[in-house]
Amino acid sequence: MLGKNSDGEVFLSSSDAPLVGLVKEVVYLEDGEYGWAKNQEITLLKNLIPQHLDFKPLTQDKLSAQKDGFRYFMEKEIYEQSLVVGETLMGRIKDNSVVLDELSTLDISHINAIKICACGTSYHAALCASYMFERLAKMQCTVEVASEFRYKEPLLDKQTLFIVISQSGETADTLEALKMAKNGGMLTLAICNVDNSTIVRTADMTILTRAGIEKGVASTKAFATQIITLWLLSLFVGEQKKVIDAAVLHNEIAALLRIPLALKVHEPTHEKIRRLSKRYLHGHGFFFIGRDLFYPLALEGALKLKEISYLHAEGYPAGEMKHGPIALADSELFTIALMPKTLLYDKMKSNVEELSARDSTLLVISPEVFELADDFIKTNAHNHPMGEFFEMMLITQLLALEISVRLGNDVDMPRNLAKSVTVE
């Protein structure tokens, strides 16, 4: 995009966040447009033809561009999650029903499957959504890594809803996958955080996640709001298809409305994580393990840690550990076990006991005290798995943050990474 201010200065940026506080108006560039800025003037061309400069106001959220007393933007954004999830839910639940005004024209009757395409953290949100769509909306759902989808000669079924997820709306691989789906005649939907971004302008429909500007490269609040948006969407589709029981819908909406409370950071918990972190600065790697919805959360927890600490970390389905990875288990292998009480607790307990028997160092996150744990972070009791999901998400984010801080890394701008991946 291009931006200009009242001093005649011209700025170029691949996303909106760096321009906050510098410009008030921006032009979003389309594919094939090019030009130059000279002497306070901007010339824009496409196929040698001059283009009209359609300036639009840039959302001015200067508070998001300040650390506001926190050490890092990432820390601030972890603490903001309770607030922004409330924004995501605003106006989207009415009379015990999910209302998505953005999808008022959507005819779901001819849709019999869902395919989701995304990269990185957004891919992990998509994996969570696949459980929700099949469990709540009774809709077959497959998930693709966008960079792989583009080159596998995929079958594009017009009865499949094609969903792309991107924080920035400029993710190159996801955008190209979206164009392929559109060219194949598929109905497309974008889940995105940035209005007017390329993906938003390309997709047939968009649901904005309303996370606000996220300046930390390692995504936190964008992930949380993506999960909430996809949860809402799965309930919406279930209602439209008339496959979701009224009691189930009531229970899901009640759980949704409790999530902002589950996302409040409690200082004693943060302090405990800060003190624990000094024990996890060495070793030969981390395994984050979980089952069901908590497997994608394990993937995301591992990604957060490796992005900002530069330590090797993997996410794994807990039941798969004995199919090979358990060979790595010793006292220098750190296992972060996500053990929710409301979902497959006994199965998870059995998997973690196997790792303990092989002398792996265990950090257990659970509402239920686990005697074999070397370290234990107690979570609150919840009557819905997603309450536990979001509380454990918070803990894994804070753990990655505090380990990285102790290692002296730049938490907000980790090496080799960019906030918006606008190239292949």
Image (cartoon, rainbow, N blue to C red):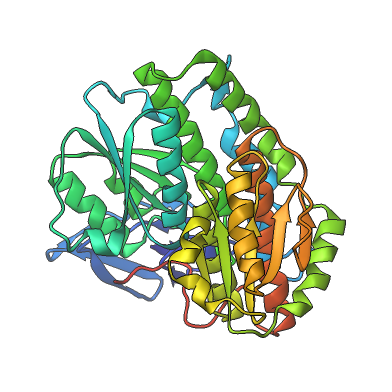
**Residue sitting at the far right:** 268
| 224 sits left or right of 81 in the view | left
Image quarter hosting the N terminus: bottom left
Of 107 and 318, which appears nearest the observer? 318
Q: Is residue 106 above or below residue 267?
A: above
**Residue sitting at the far front:** 357
Name the residue: 15% across, 45% down: 156
On the image, the x and y values in percent for residue 368 come to: 76, 48
Does residue 323 appear in the picture of this structure?
Answer: yes
On the image, the x and y values in percent for residue 146 come to: 30, 59
Residue 123 sits in quarter: bottom left
On the image, the x and y values in percent for residue 386 come to: 61, 40
Image quarter hosting the C terminus: bottom left
Does residue 65 appear in the picture of this structure?
Answer: no
Name the residue: 47% across, 82% down: 416
Name the residue: 61% across, 67% down: 355
Residue 88 sits in quarter: top right
Of 396 and 207, which appears nearest the observer? 396
Q: Is residue 270 above or below residue 86?
A: below
Label count reads: 0
| 214 sits left or right of 9 in the view | right
Of 149 and 67, which appears nearest the observer? 149
Q: Is residue 170 above or below residue 293?
A: below
On the image, the x and y values in percent for residue 380 come to: 77, 44
| 309 sits left or right of 237 in the view | right
Residue 287 sits in quarter: bottom right
